[in-house]
Amino acid sequence: MTSPHPRPDVTVVVIVYNDAARIETAVRSVLDQSLRSREVIVVDDHSTDNTPEVMERLAAQHPDDVRFIRLAANSGHCGAPRNEGVRNARGRYIMFLDSDDTLDRHACRNMVAMAEESEADMVIGRCVRHDVATGKEHSWMPWLVQRKVVHESLRDEPELLYDVLSTNKLYRHDFLTRENLVFLEDRYYEDNVFSAHAYLTAKKIAVIPQRVYTWNVERGAASLSITNRARDVRNLTDRIAVTRQIDALLARYGTPELRLQKDIRFIENDLRTHLAGIGDAAEADQRKLIEVAGPYVRGIDPEAFKQAKPLPAIAAYMVRVDDLEGVATAHDYIASKDNRPRLTTTLTVRDGRIFWCDRHLDDPLGREVLDVTELGFQDLPLAKLALGSRITSVERAGSSVTVSGVITNPLGRLDGKVKASLAVVARRNRRRQFTAKATIAPVGTELAWTATVGPDEAPRPIGFVDPVYSLALRVKAGGETCDVHLFAPDELTEELSLPVRPRLSRLAADRMEAYRTDRGNLALRLSAEGKRARAGDATLKKVRSQPLGARAWGKAASLRRDVRQAMDKRKTKLAWYDNVFSRMPISKRTIVFESHMGKQFSDSPRAIYEELKRSGVRFRAVWAYADDHPNGFPGDVKLVRRQSYAYLRELGRARYWVDNQGFPHDLRKRAGTTYIQTWHGSAFKRMGFDEANIKRQTASQQQKLQDAIDRFDFFLARTEHDVRTLTKGMRVHADLMRVGYPRNDVLVKPHNDDEVAALRKQLNLHDDRKVLLYAPTFRPDEIATGSKGLTLPFSLDDFVERFGDKYVLLVRPHYLVSFALPPMYAHSVRNVANVHDVTPLMQIADAVITDYSSLMFDYALLDRPMVFHVPDYDDYVGSSRGSYFDLAEVAPGPLTRTGDELFAALADLGELEERYAERHRAFTAKFCEYDTGTAAKAVVDRFFAQGARRG
């Protein structure tokens, strides 16, 4: 006879405690599975709310699919209810689900299909963290689930140890029984031991890339989850105990080689999670945490510290040596959803290397772990250093408030003339800014600042509609500007409030009070202190206390929130661009300039802009910039941040677009706008639709690229070679202007002597040594996430030893690539990554070292020695990017493959110049034929001069 209740394919065990509001959603995500052969067992850890009533109703509604088990007493952990669920499960496979999370509709079907196909003991799917408040999502450990794969054992993919969740996996029921896989019932982090045990004993481990599990994160919940209470001493104690049990499992199953991988994970994830924000805790609490973690950390293999990511490794090392300050400063700089990074340590230079601090450098392990030279603190722009300032005092005198604080001065980057101001910026409209001048002066290794906000400096918000403002110390030093986030202990945060004069009168508010954001830095919100403001606030509260007023206020708040979120979406921005900005009257004198996607004030757009200024033509210039502050951009133009509404507005109404790479591809160019595309280099590498990665794209993706290119009205060409290769490969249909590149005019007819002299001074080029410029193109691995940037394909030690008294080497990475130069080479090497325009660098250089960069064509105009260092030539040209010609046949200089070959070529530049003179002339004739020094003037005369044709 057929059983009335056949064995289901999957049992989903759902655990719950006091979660009546969400348990039904979790259960229904199982009931709604596309795989109908499933059951759900809900195990209640003795809830005290209405959870039992909700579950009894669901079980009654679905008697064949839902079973409800209530434990006799609360266990306080997740292990006991999960084990109870497994004991009662009937399914051939088992999954686990928490009451506040959900399964994807096809989770069971996809997981079972993979299990059947692969015969694996367990299957792993994609888990997605969903921020309930913002709706933002990101995958959990995405690199582990990128593709469908079957691992014979954990040894095939040791990094699986990073994914310790039990909930995004499917297990064979008989596998759990065979290996006696159960959860710990007396500790937190029971998932860790269970997952490690499963990984180590599974005969096969399958992975699918599909989404199977949604992990809902509610940071404002009244009772935070275990993972959101990570800094509790009890939690850390349990984490250490659980980790020791995992160590025992690793030893038991004879896999000591995996211990290193586990130790690295402990440093990078477990320990980091528990000590995050430790600097904000009371010193006694900090000490307790370090005392709990210290004994275990001191037993970790030193190799794990060396291989772990730098900042978590520094934090762990500081625990190892019982350095409380070091632990705090390392965690201050580790970015997370709960921590806005700020640099609070005193970096130090020893033997030409950068170290996190001046302590522990006599310990070989400490010296290696604390070496942060490769992080590039010495070269990063100020805005990217993530400086942070600590408020030290708040004083009120009548209607004035004086705020004081200190800011770290890393490596003396803030030496010299420094200006500062307290900046108050509206969150909803950054154009509404108020500043109060601050005094700033060095005090030891820090700078101390003070700002007073009185009636005259008081911010003037509108009131009601702009209640929240950012607060920062705006610092200007060395030609750079950056906003430094402010931090303060609770007592000073409570004291800090600034006077305000709302435009909607003081009934709206009369103070701005400080509060700590979710990421730890300070912000301001409008508040009421005086009699009129309190009266206005009381009236508002009275209105909100009435049912009708409460509903109206709630709807208004919801509408504001929805509008704010919608306005940040690309779809909304495009709608504004298409339906509003592009229908505004065209501003006939407006030209929007952009260079390298807003990263620089440089290249041919700059040359055209400067020619326009020289010509006396009346025009309105708008420059787009990409970073927080437009450092290095001219101050006498309209500056708009790329992708902002102001940027879209200017593009929508501009008469001309001028750029060298491409405005955002999804922006439609209106009929009345003329797009002048200067491009950014001639073609050696295959371009556009000739590139292998473009050829692999779908027809839809290729059409989007074609649509973006078809916006060009005019395209500048410098040689017939580009007409045959570059424009053809990109399928350019625009009118070609065979005038050369405006950026190269100064290489043919120099007229910027003052700029070149200033740059030489800036780079400290004062002696008679010759200058070499190393300017390579980028490699895909150099711009990938987590990349360390440019790694020089030759030894700087050898270069300095051989040529340090003869040459100064300028290293110019591609603008997409970072580069960190150890200070030990400062005498003979300069990092010029932050110089906006490469053209004056070429003018300074007596010779150039490049590879496949289009800079080769520009530098050829100077008729100076060139060396092509191409150790990866066969791979780059043969299988990576491809080329339009054989560089070896036409290069106006030698091709070198090794460091020794490169140095041999550099030994006598004079001989090199003479030997390649004829080739150089032929190269210039072929690839620079239209570069005659008049390109910028030709563009200005063609479009902008009086009587010129306008399009």
Image (spheres, helix red, strand yellow):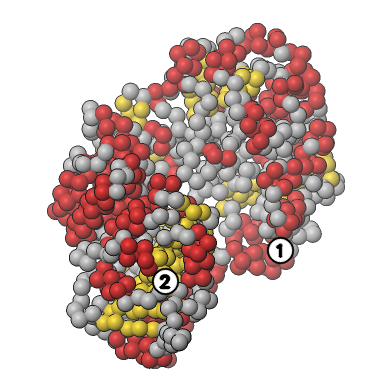
Task: Give, as a three-letter code, the residue at label 2.
Answer: Arg
Task: Give, as a three-letter code, the residue at label 1.
Answer: Ser
Name the mark nearer the viewer: 2 or 1. 2
Residues 226 and 721: in front is 226
Where residue 114 sits: x, y (%)?
A: 51, 63
Residue, disc 1 = 582
**Is residue 143 visible to us here?**
yes
Name which quarter of the figure residue 75 lies in. Answer: bottom left
Identify which residue is drawn at 29% across, 82% down. 69
How packed mark 2 is, by other alpha carbons closer than 10 Å (few <14, some 14-19, many 20 or more), is some
Q: What whole-number distance in Å separates the C-alpha atoms at marks 2 and 1?
A: 60 Å
**Is residue 438 visible to us here?**
no
Identify which residue is drawn at 72% across, 33% down. 883
Where residue 769 sits: x, y (%)?
A: 52, 13
Identify which residue is drawn at 76% across, 29% down. 885
Name which quarter of the figure residue 28 lies in. Answer: bottom left
Could you tell which of marks 2 and 1 lies nearer the N-terminus? Answer: 2
SS at mark 2 in the image? loop
Residue 92's tag is 2
Residues 554 and 914: in front is 914
Position of 466 relative to 737 (above/below): below
How packed mark 1 is, by other alpha carbons closer than 10 Å (few <14, some 14-19, many 20 or more), is many
